[in-house]
Image (tube, coloured by chain):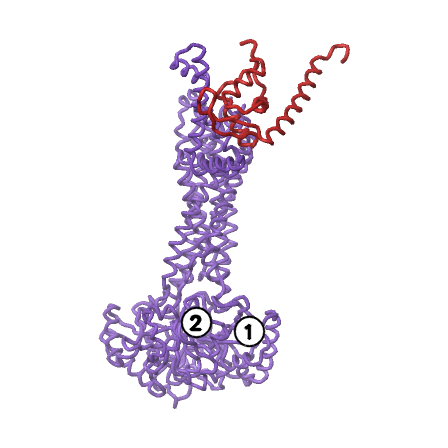
Amino acid sequence: MKFLDFLRLRIAHLFSRAEQNAEVDDEVASHIQLRADDLERSGLSRAEAERRARIEFGGQEHYKEECHEALNGSTFIESLFHDVRFGIRVLRKSPGFTLVAVVTLALAIGANAVVFAVLNALILRPVNVPEAESLWSIQRGSQRAINHSYLDYVDLRDRNRSFEGLTAYNLAAAGLDTGGDPASAWIMEATGNYFDVLKVHPYLGRFFHAGDEHGPNSAPYIVLTYAYWHSHFQDDRDVVGRVVQLNKHPFTILGVAPPEFRGTLLFVFPDFWVPLVNQEQVEGLDVRNERGNHFLLMMLGHLKPGVTPAQAVSDLNSIGASLEKSYPKDDSQMTFSLTRPGLAGDWLGGPLQAFLGGLMLLAALILLAACANLGSLFAARAADRSREVALRLSLGASRVRILRQLFTEAVLISLVGGAVGLWGGILLLRALSVWHPMPTTPLQIPIRPDWHVYTVAVLLSVASGFLFGAVPVRQVLHTDPYQVIKSGPAAAVWRRLTARDLLLVVQIAICAVLVTASLVAVRGLVRSLHSNFGFEQQNAMLVETSLSMGGYKGEQIPLMQKRMIDALENIPGVTSVGTVDRLPLYYGANSANVFTDQTADLSPANAAASAATYNISPGYFDAAGTVLLAGRKLSWHDDKNAPPVAVVNREFARRILGSVSDGVGRYYKLRDGSRVQVVGLVEDGKYGTLSEATRPAMFLPITQAPLATDMALVVRSNRDPQQVADAVSSTIRGLDAGLPFTIRTWKQELEGALFPSRMATLALGVFGMMGAVLSITGIFGMAAYSVSKRMRELGIRIALGARREEVLLAALGRAVRLLAFGSAAGLALGLLASRILASIVYQASPRDPLVLLGAVLAMALLGILATWIPAQRALSVDPLILLRDE
Amino acid sequence: MPDQAQLLPGTLDLLILKAVSLGPLHGYGVLLRIGQISGETLLIEQGALYPALFRLFRQGLLKASWGTSENNRRAKYYELTAAGRKRLREETEGWNRLAGAIASALSAQPEEA
């Protein structure tokens, strides 16, 4: 009974304070009636008796409130309720402070949530297949190449004893005709065992299996991704068994993959899967029999239970050693390492991991700076509230209770800030997930924040609340109520170095790091936009297509290429047209080992260099705007009947030919032993990535190269690109209406190449801005606080005839000194941190004097901006008013 | 009121427990009982009684139920719980020890020191 009563009251309080009010009211009323009865009996009138009874009872409201406290006093939840309610009241009373604090935290926690979500989606979360923890991808050699040749794959698959099964796949583009417009689609060519090795089961229909492969082009099957089925087949369940045209070959749709399985890369989603045995139909040529063609397949598989990655590596290495012995011409560096699948190996995963790790660190620094900032704000507020605190202490509140109240306020702010930040972050991530940074590739950043992200955001919020809430603790613990109430809060002890000063220095240092880092990144980006690519992007249009999509084969390919070039050259305004098999600065360059003319043993170990290789038509250099330095360009007469020739870049001439000035006319050798004469020399350029070191490159005539169906036409004109684009489109349609192609300016194309450094710059720029804002508010808070604390002293100084600069020095000297100290420390740290940036942001050198100057100027400007208002206030002190005031 | 004494802090709870231990009482009744058993020497402001009653109730030392007074008024009656009886015993012993010690200290004569 007692317990039930207890419980009832508890619940009554939590859910309806009204009921409790009624209970207390009733009891007080009953008391007064009983007392009045007694008084009436002693001879008073009823009205007078009730009046007397009420007076004797004392302050009713006061006692009722005490009753509530007695009833609800000290269970944790209930007093938390009290604290929260009180906290909200207090925060409402100072909306400016609350707003600043919430916005600061929202920015900082939002930044952390976003970066963590990206990290979570790309690095922490594995590829979405069953038993993902035992799934590994295989890399080769010291370069950690992620690609392998088909024959090497077959040997590794059949001879290893560590994997349950090994599968391999490749990305390719192909034209799909479902009866309407033929469109280009992204496909994964996979070995027959792909779905079985990954243990994925179909959503609809069936998958292809190893048993479906019976030699080249024997398995014309398509497995659709759920997304593509949804968007291109409108969830039509009758799609299974339908025959569609892939590059003008009939393919049967076998089934649809489950929605959660979108391939084995985390940032590129194919439209469908096709068996690799049909490579010839998909890509126009079948290179599965070329053991030396290492740039073909990515390999992955589940380790057998109980096999460690190290054991698997030594297993693979022993196979690799025997392959090297058996095929010395094709296989070298056959040592292996394992990596997590999904990010195309360490090649992409490494820098991405470093970058995201760095970003996370910066985000954490932002949050730390925000906490330092809010911590000093809280400390200042606690000092200003010292009268309130002292009053509460002297009225009997315990210090623990007061501290808890302060913490409640801090956590309240941080939770609201965290919620707002997370909300903003989710909006940003949604925009990011539907964004296609490179329009012609299936590249996407699919980030759906999950409970990991929410948990991290909440934890960060609470942690930062406690962090900045803890700053004024010592202050409160040392409050002497008697002293404070007697002399007022102005009796601040101006110690030599307070914790608050230290916080400010740390915060400014962090902000200087951020500002420096973002300046480094921005400068790097600006530079990379103006560096020499080895081609001229202005006024150049690109037409990309693959003739295999139009069903061209064998000798039809060069004929069609020539027809396209001739037709495009006849468009008015077009000055030159050239083709190249693979655009520089896009998917990375094809490279091949080259040997000096004197080399006899052409094994990979004796190669003079690995050169970027381009197969071009004679008009390419004119169309691309690549400058010829010496010799001649290629011509249509350099065909199969003529001796092999090449045009090389300066770096090639320097490293392989041994001379830049008279390199023209010299010879070098290719892997197949053919001697190639260099007939021309062109400028150096960028081939694989913007941040690469200058590397050798050779340009070979397509007329002497093996047939290839992928091509980019470069069309240079002196007219408006849009008009030319229309003419180019109709010309190509006139030649073959069924050939899918894309047309863009080279400038647009380059957006893709610049994407990583753009993203880096954007992220760092945002962080730099946040850092700047934080340091402004931090310094401002500190300066304003120090001025307001010392108003009286400043007034006396002015009254005694101090000059303006002396007043300023007295008021702000400390803030400025701290600022300078913090900035210097931050700048030094920032320069160290910027080294990491140099690997991602092209030409980001932290030792750039402009960056240094910029950072110093920025910090100085921030300092001036932040101390301006407090300085004005210090100068306008009127000693008379001040002295009268106190 | 020269013949009335201020309550020492903490003694109000003890007095309430004592008063209620003699039989169920409503709040006003508790006041009257304390006045009666203390020979009208202890002064308690009437309102101050209630927070104390609620506190003891919450601690589980008292139980309460609404009933009707002898002059037909609705009133809440308090009774001691088992825990309340135990607490009363302990506090009484504690108080007696303290009072005895103080009394003996105050009655010390110069020659005994």
Q: Is residue A363 above or below residue A679?
A: above
> Percent x, y for residue A686?
42, 69
Q: Nearer the viewer, residue A665 or A216?
A: A216
Q: Nearer the viewer, residue A408 or A583?
A: A408
Residue A528, quarter of the rendered image: bottom left
Q: Is residue A273 above or below residue B41?
A: below
Mark 1 and mark 2 residues within 8 Å of each other at the beta carbon: no
Q: Residues within 10 Å of mark 2 (few under 14, many from 20)?
A: some
At label 2, which amino acid type do we have? Gly
Marks 1 and 2 sit apart, C-alpha to C-alpha, by 18 Å
Q: Nearer the viewer, residue A654 or A296?
A: A296
At label 1, which amino acid type do we have? Gly
The residue where tag 2 is placed is A588
In the current view of this chain or complex, which residue is farthest to the bottom? A641
State the hue of chain B.
Answer: red
Chain where mark 2 sits: A
Chain where mark 1 sits: A
> Percent x, y for residue A17?
43, 34
Residue A480, quarter of the rendered image: top right
Q: Is residue A564 above or below residue A764?
A: below
- Supply the letter of whichever chain is purple: A
Q: Which mark is residue B60?
A: none
Q: Residues within 10 Å of mark 1 (few under 14, many from 20)?
A: few
Residue A801, quarter of the rendered image: top left
> Percent x, y for residue A214?
45, 86
Q: Quadrant of the C terminus of chain A?
A: top left
Left or right: where A881 falls relative to A70: left
What element does badge 2 sit on?
loop
What element does badge 1 sit on?
loop
The residue where tag 1 is placed is A141
> Percent x, y for residue A523?
42, 56
